[in-house]
Structures are given as structure tokens and as C-alpha cells.
Image (spheres, grey):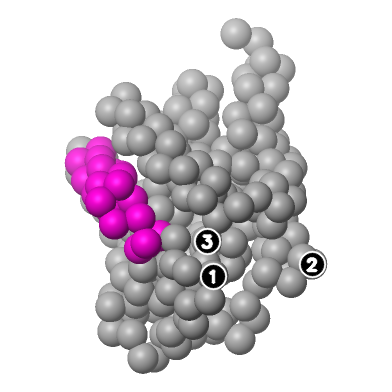
Amino acid sequence: MAVEWFYLLLLVTGFIAGIINTLAGGGSNLTLPALMMMGMPADVANATNRVGVLLQCVSAAKGFHRYGKLPVEAIFPVMLPTLFGGALGAAAAVIAPNEILKPLLLVTMIGMAVIILVSPSVVAPGQDEQPKRVQDSPTGIAGLMFAGFYGGFVQAGVGFVLLAAITGALRYDLVRANALKVICTLGFTLIALLIFIADDLVQWLPGLVLAAGTMSGASVAVKFAIKVEAKVLKWFLLLMTLFASAAALFIQ
């Protein structure tokens, strides 16, 4: 396949992944294989993928803020534990064997699908329910730290872990939880990317082409998220969880 077609594949895949990541998670299950199709080793693809994720989060965060759906007062308390976990996760990713990535991803995805089916109120709190402060929720702090570690380590599927913590423990509705999710992802992805850059693992041209797609997808996803009912987002989240679980089976 000609190089031009690979870049077109990255652009289209990035657009789809930007939508999936903004509304749920698991878009990296598309972008990582696309990068590896260009001949990148898994660690280089993992690092290069973060360029697209970072800029996608910038686009989504601006969109949620523009529509008044980003709880600005919660940004710092929510980000702090995820940044700490993200730094540890990225450091671990540099030295950890790739063999542990697939089991970790599968357990996370399947667990999230079970939660949505058995206890849907965990990911879809009532519209009138008052969110909890992070400092008042030890479960929320632990969940955010784990999400940060997981995201810094592998990225794929981290949106599900963040949503579980922000909706389940902190009781934000799905739209605002998605807004906080992209802020958290932006934070620990930046830390992870800096670590990967220091290790010279990032290929910039494929990363920026991918980012052009993810940013466009994120912009479309924000407009969709603020217009649809919560139950539609919940079922979209379930479908994407099942998709991510199936996709993880094919990740080498």
C-alpha cells in the first residue's frame, strides 16, 4: 500500500476514533492497529498515538466549555489524582512487557460492560442528582488514580475507566462526565507524551495526521453529546464497550 493511502487511513480512522473517544472510549483500539500497519513497533505506535489523543482532547474540551457543559470548578480536584497515576503509568509502560497489555485491557472492558448491564445507574446518574466533591469520595480518588495509571500505561479504553469513576463515584451526568474525562485524559496524556518524547518513541508526521482526524471527530462528537438524551449516550457507551472488548482480542 502506498504511503499516501496509509495517511488517508490514519485520517479516517482518527476521525472515527475522535468521536468514539469523546463520547465513550476505546478509539485507540482503531488507531493503534492503524499505526502498526505502517510498520511501527507496538511501543512506538503507543507513543505516537498520544499525539492524536492529546489534540483530540483539546478540541473536545473547548467544545464542551463553549456549550457550558464543562464543570470548571471540578477540573483541578479531578485532574490531580489522574495526573499522578498517569505519570506512574507512562513510566511503567516504558519498561513493562507488551504481553500484559492485552489481559489488562480485556479485564477492564468486560468489567465495564458488566457494570453497565447489571447496574446502569452507575454510569447514568439521575439528572437531579448532586455530584460529589472529589475530596469527599475516597472511592473517586482511587478510581481516578487507577484511570490515570491505566491511561498512562496503555491509553486504549481509558475513557471507560474514567467514566466509571466520574459517574459512578462522583455522580456526574454523562455529558459533564465526558467533559471532565477529556480534561483528565488531556492531562495524563501530556505527561505520557513528554516521557515518550524523551525516549524518542514518537513519529511526528503520522501522529499529526492522526490528530487532524481525531480533532475533527471530537468536534462532531461534542455537538452530538449535548443534543441527545442520556439513555442514548448510555447505550452508545455500552456498544462501544462491547466493541472495545472484541477489538482487544485482536491486539497483538
**Residue 147 painted magenta:** no
**How far apart are the two marked residues, 3 and 1, measured between alpha carbons?**
9 Å
Question: Which stretch did the figure color magenta?
Answer: 102-123
Is 173 above or below relative to 38? below
Assign a secondary structure to mark 1: loop
Q: Residues within 10 Å of mark 3 (few under 14, many from 20)?
A: many
Query: Of 247 and 125, which appears nearest the observer?
Result: 125
Q: Which of the two discs, 3 and 1, sits closer to the camera? A: 1
Asked if residue 194 lies left or right of residue 139, the reply is: right
Q: Earlier in the sequence, mark 2 or mark 3?
A: 2
Q: Secondary structure at mark 2?
A: helix
The residue that label 1 is drawn on is 127
**Which kind of residue does numbered mark 1 sit on?**
Gln
Mark linked to residue 174: 3
Measure the alpha-carbon separation of dots 2 and 1: 21 Å
Viewer-side residue, 154 vs 221: 221
Q: Is residue 121 magenta?
A: yes
Q: Quadrant of the N terminus?
A: top right
User: Quadrant of residue 250 in the image?
Assistant: top left
